[in-house]
Image (cartoon, rainbow, N blue to C red):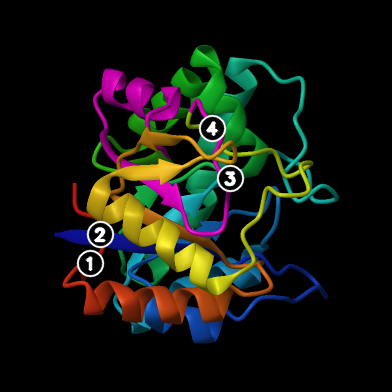
Amino acid sequence: MKVDLNCDLGEAFGNYSFGGDKDIIPLVTSANIACGFHAGDQHVMNQTIALAKQHNIGIGAHPGLPDLQGFGRRNMDITPNEIYDIVVYQLGALYGFCKIHDVSMNHVKPHGALYQMGARDKAIAQAIAQAVYDFDESLIFVGLSNTLLISEAKSVGLATASEVFADRRYEDDGQLVSRKDANALITDTNEAIEQVINMVKSQKVITKNNNTIDIEADTICVHGDGAHALEFVSQIRERLSKEGISISRLEG
């Protein structure tokens, strides 16, 4: 049994720095790097790719909505054609830095509201997936388990990785609980670890309503901007090892 451990990284920009990328990157197997629209900038992309290369982890693009003030977590009234263009644009930005560091882009994971919109809306999911496929059909598409993000990516011909979250709670339909809900985030390390082990070993997750639903877990996400990100990553990694679950980067 194996699983990928990913983290959303490279989210500083300009004079604004946060997160512990240098400490987290050695502990994960995949990095989802912000591409400048919801967070990140050209300097941070360059530095984060260099750091990921140093530790030989999978490099992924993390395209989001053009909303720095809202950190890409606010829904926008945007057409599928516009979504296609903003995804291609951001993939191109990150690819440029991958090229100068002589590393490959391994995967793509939409960010924030773009991710949530795609999980619920077929046209949006298809636009994101088509943009990724047209840019590079060998890229692995990372999306929320058992949602339209995965089914539409498979439909266009992409390899997929079903993602689960260590630090988020779930609705009964498999969607993530909205961040507007006071109980959306898991902040207790032990609770996060137990949720991860259940998802990986049993392919189940307990929802906010205390129901048990099926879930596929190819890759586990810990948010790099979370207050407990480093603690979550280090202890989840330790527990997975004790459970005999190997941690390895995504493969197409």
Q: Earlier in the sequence, mark 3 or mark 2?
A: 2
Q: Which mark is residue 248?
A: 1
Image-quadrant location for residue 170: top right
> Residues at badges 4 and 2 in contact (C-beta under 8 Å)?
no
Amino acid type at image mark 3 = His
Crowding at label 1, few (<14), some or many (≥20) Cα neighbours within 10 Å? some
Magenta residues, as a range?
Answer: 144-173
Who's the residue at 52% across and 29% down the image? 172
Q: Which mark is residue 3?
A: 2
Residue under label 4: 175
Q: Earlier in the sequence, mark 2 or mark 1?
A: 2
Who's the residue at 69% across and 73% down the image? 227
Amino acid type at image mark 2 = Val
Q: Is residue 152 magenta?
A: yes
Q: Which mark is residue 111?
A: 3
Quarter of the image with the N terminus in it: bottom left
- Tell me: 123 left or right of 234: right
